[in-house]
Image: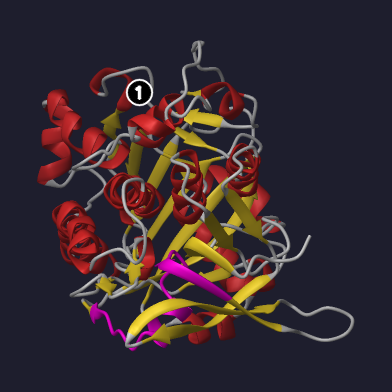
Amino acid sequence: MAAPERTRVAVVGGGPAGMVLGLLLARGGIDTVVLEKHPDFLRDFRGDTVHASTLALLDELGLGSAFEALPHRLLDEVEIQLDAGTVRLADLVRYLPGLHPHIALVPQWDFLEMLAEAAAREPHFTLLRSAKAVGLTHDAGRVAGVRWRDYPGTEGGSQDHTLAADLVVACDGRWSTVRAQAGLTAREFGAPVDVWWFRVPRREGDPNGGVGRLSGREFMIMIDRGTEWQCGYLIAKGQDAALRAEGLPAFRSRLARLLPWMAERLDEYPASLDDVRLLSVRVDLLDQWYQDGLLLIGDAAHAMSPVGGVGINLAIQDAVAASRIVGQWMRHASGPVPEEVLAQVQKRRLLPTKLVQAFQRAAHRGIVNRALRGALATSATTLPLPLRLLNRARFLQRIPARFIAIGPRPEHAPSWARRLERLSPPEGRVG
């Protein structure tokens, strides 16, 4: 089938925000094309969490049963292990409302394929795979479409195409091509750390759920993926090359000291430093998320730290708000979307974005940075004061539970996108 040359909305980026936005707009009868540069979703994603507010959204969309059919685990507690003992940071089952008092861990490629299959049933939706956005087109100063290229190229070589649109929405992440092409520069807040991501087999008797481990200058987070741990080892910003130069045995020794209960399997895992992926942590924010004919959401508008693992959830909430605000206008009018309508999306989502980033930056300063400098008091017998409070006054766990799993302003699907479905109790709980 020939690629379309015109659509009402062109969404750049087939990640969670782009796929959710495309699905919701298409259900509103709005012609929408999503451009995804890869031929499929089978890539090594670091963000495989689906939060409680997103699970509630899937129920609203009639996709609860489809999600339940995916391989997944349910995380309902988060704890941190220190030399002085283990502290539960959040009890999601006790303190979250609704049908989903948990966070789901699911391979992101399965989650995206589920969304793609649901969207493909909508006559107003088109997904262009292997379509890499390379530029924007303009008409009298207004963004009027996307220039895209076959990626990584066909046997006859890459071909350039143009997709005209009444609105272009950038969902292409923290290194957004669209943002760069639009000449927009985000305000950076800085981050003291980067993260090394790798995987280690999980065994019977290991802790359940999400685990943080802090000892001396070593800090690691671990996500229970059932048969394996997805591990994030925090390093000082810019130290990737120096640590790699120390070699694999030195890194394994660090991990064995930090996690003595896992030391035996660390003789084999990670298998090499090639299996250790660097995540360059970045926190930034665009002052203005839109231009005439263009809207940016998710990491394209505000890159998030991995603290709390909330970036995907926040991006999806952006997409839902955008679908409701922009979709409502487009369902009753034709032509380019006025800038004042696009401004309403930023107005709606700016406060929760700032709140989450403020929380992450405070965590960088007060916990992560101090821990890497060895300045956080974590003796073998005494817990830091904030953790002692969480241990003694369990009701305080309600705050991190709701903030992480739901977020400061959860969004709900527009009425035209909702589908009724009989819900069943969740399975696959962790903990």
Residue 77 sits in quarter:
top left
The count of marks equals 1
Residue at which label 1 appears: 101
Q: Is residue 101 above or below residue 403?
A: above
| In magenta stretch: residue 185 | yes
Residue at horizontal 26%, vertical 20%? 97
Q: Is residue 278 above or below residue 429?
A: below
Q: Does dot 1 land on a helix, a strand or a loop?
A: loop
**Residue 13: % across, % down:** 52, 64
**Residue 180: % across, % down:** 40, 85
Residue at horizontal 61%, vertical 43%? 123
The answer to which of 17 and 24 lies nearer the viewer is: 24
Q: Residues within 10 Å of mark 1 (few under 14, many from 20)?
A: many
Magenta stretch bounds:
163-187
The answer to which of 34 and 209 lies nearer the viewer is: 34
The answer to which of 278 and 171 lies nearer the viewer is: 171
**Residue 259: % across, % down:** 49, 50
Relative side of 303 to 112, left or right: left
From this viewpoint, is residue 348 visible?
yes
Q: Quadrant of the N terminus?
A: bottom right
Q: Is residue 268 above or below residue 293?
A: above
From this viewpoint, is residue 76 visible?
no
**Residue 135: % across, % down:** 51, 85
Q: Is residue 34 above or below residue 63?
A: below
Residue at horizontal 35%, vertical 48%? 327
| In magenta stretch: residue 365 | no
Disc 1 marks which amino acid? Pro
